[in-house]
Amino acid sequence: MSAVDTAIPTPKKSPLDVVIAPRTENEELISGSEAIAHAVRLANVDVITAYPIRPYDTVMQYVSKMIADGDFDCEFIVAESEHSQFEIVKHASAVGARVFAGSSGVGWFYAFEALAVTAGLRLPMVAMVGNRALDDPGAFGVEHNDALAVRDLGWMLCWVSTAQEALDTALIAYRVAEDPRIFLPCAISCDGAFLTHSQSIVKVPSQAMVDSFLPRYDRGDKRLHPDNPITIAPQVNEDWLMEMRRQSDEAARRASDVLIEAYRDFNAKFGRGGEPFIERYMMDDAEVALVGMGTMAMPVKVAVRKMREQGKKVGFVRVRWFRPFPTRELQDALADVHAVGVIDRDFSFGSAFFSGVLANELRSALYPAKKKNQPKILSFIAGLGGREVSTGNVMKMTKTVFDAANGVGTDAQDTYWIGARE
Amino acid sequence: MQEAKEQASARDFTSPQVLEPWTGIKKVAHEEYYTSGHRTCQGCESAQMMRLLAKAAGPRTIVVGATGCMYVANTTYYSTPWVLPWMHTQLGSAGSAATGTAAGLRALMRKGKMDKEPINVIAVCGDGGGADMGLSAISAALQHTQYNLLVMLYDNESYANTDIQISGSSPYGVNTSFSPPGKLHRIMHKHWKKNTAPMLAVGHPDCRYVATVVASNAVDTLNKVRRALSIGGPTFLHSLNPCPKGWDYDPKYSQQIGELAVETGIWPLYEIEDRKLKMYGKSQHIASGVVKRKPVSEYLLRQGRFAHFTQEDIARVQARTDEMWEKWFLPGVIALSGA
């Protein structure tokens, strides 16, 4: 598939653009967490469970205040652990309720058993992960290893970079997760502090707009109810497990097309949303590219603009969806660059080339590309535990990528730790 | 605002079902909601307990079951004994599963997304899932007084599904695959059985109903299930379920061994409703002194799991059982004493 297939027509140019709901949106100065709280209110979520851990838990503070003020009606349960938090919404989802939960760092890991079975049972939970380092050693700041841990389980997984994108993506997440062709849970990753706690101007859509985009959750003949006395999740053993895994695999494959559909509709109705899967920044004539996820997009874009002013042909690709992984889109976006620097806010100890998770995933995705189109791929580990990734860091990394492109002084299989004390 | 709206428009679904007690075995409903289709062992009292539970609850019920015998041996894909809607939950999640199911139904009914009616929500768990791993989730569930739900712990005093290993609910000295008697240590398991039901009753003052049952006393069991589902809010039942495989006896004696547990005073039958204790059946007779407790040896010596016991071990169990009835603040139930 080329870029043309996935490109989203801008609403103003598209003859098919039909605005169903009036475009009434309030502009509010809110954080990423508050933006997601607005999204779950607008999605009319039925059951929400909370458990405190920084930094995700700010979303639950906003949700509980909305309920207290009578602006939002849902069952709001403060669980006694993350494991219970995610088990409660898992079962609420099985009886047909739209659900929301979230966590951070080791809290997400405390829920891990529930996370695994939620995907295995094809229950369309939407969760927010306020990315946080996996302490010990203790650290409140962002690392992506928490959310990345579910990448092999059947969760859809995305990273957002602004509060607006957080709100919009949460609405898209419900639509895709609850689509009967998919029925997979979805985690929205928000960088701790940089997004969860940072305020920016966000367009908060009206209920009518959201209702025109997001249909009701209908579990159909899989709903657990006395009128539909089915048995869910029996022992299947070796007799059936492979077929069921295969069904989940097919759903995960279908997710790409359903996401494209949803983004197309979102762009048409809201006039924003952009290209699904990846964001291309100054990539048109780029000779080298940086790749990353989440809020590091901001310093990277600033640095890319500065370097462009200096005549350096560098671009940036922000990976928005990690699951499904945008293999074709990345092959397309990086087809003409000579070298790629992947900036991971995570690590994979002992992995191939001791790289970050995204770097190795990208290497896999680009491996089948034609030899002449195969860029060199460098892995940078940066910003762990919430350490700032500065524009200076980015420019230094870019120099290394240019060196690799020119065959100077670097091995394309190297991994570089950026900004760490020696 | 929300509460007022609920009270005005929806008493029908926020109130529990009205399940009157059955006044004798002849009044018990004929319908079964837990039938053939399982592969539990011959003489499995836990399976019998599931049958009584489903029968007492009736058709407008959702059951969630934590990992354990009553999951693995009951529901093998392509067959199920459950006529009721049933869903598996994780080993430590019985309380959470009941809470989530009840919360989902309540939200959907309140918001007009589902027909309004009271639906029983029951979670079942074994002693591993209930007394060990799932204890905190059950504790949390018993605090959610806005939901009508029942957690039933079926206690066969071991992790019986995974080859019989000790749990926090296993009796002193028992021979399991994690506590085998050996040349150096005759007794490997030195803990006393966890007193789960009173702990939950005392620790959760807003939980209106906690009771103990045994399948050999079927009518009592049925009516306690019906009371637990009718009273409103979260409730808890603890059943003792003799297990031929784990306890090592001929399956035909399951009910006799259940009865002996009651008659020796090892398993008292009682209910705690609105913080009032009431002893039941033979336990009531023991408590009031009308009937003398049988010696614990009559119970212990019927089971291979205690075959390694010496007279000294039996005397130790007898002494602890005597203490339960003679020294405890509430005999057979609560082990506190007045200052």
Image (cartoon, coloured by chain):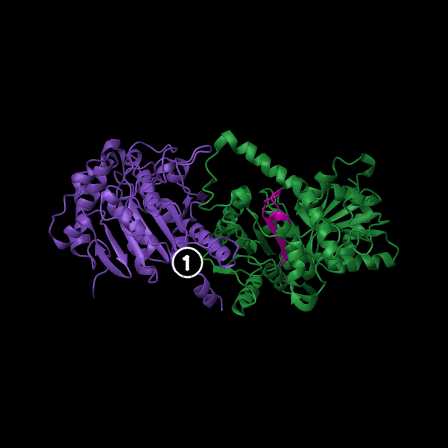
Using the image as rendered, state which of residue B238 and residue A379 is in the foreground: B238
Chain letter corresponding to the colour purple = B
Q: Is residue A412 visible?
A: no
Q: Is residue B290 above or below residue B216?
A: below
Q: Which residues are magenta?
A: A176-193
List the residue tagged with mark 1. Answer: B12
Image location (x, y in percent) of residue A251 = 62, 40
Q: Position of residue A373 (x, y in %)?
A: 82, 38
Please, what is the three-letter code of the amino acid marked with disc 1? Asp
The colour applied to the residues of chain A in this rendering is green
Q: Chain of mark 1?
A: B
Q: From the viewer's perspective, is residue A356 above or below residue B335?
A: above
Q: Is residue A381 left or right of residue B154?
A: right
A34 in magenta: no
Name which residue lies at 83% across and 36% down: A372
Quadrant of the rendered structure where residue A58 is? bottom right
Rendering coords of residue A328 (x, y %): 74, 41
**Residue A266, located in which quarter of the rendered image?**
bottom right
Determine the residue positioned at 29% across, 61% down: B274
**Residue positioned 83% across, 54% down in the render:** A13
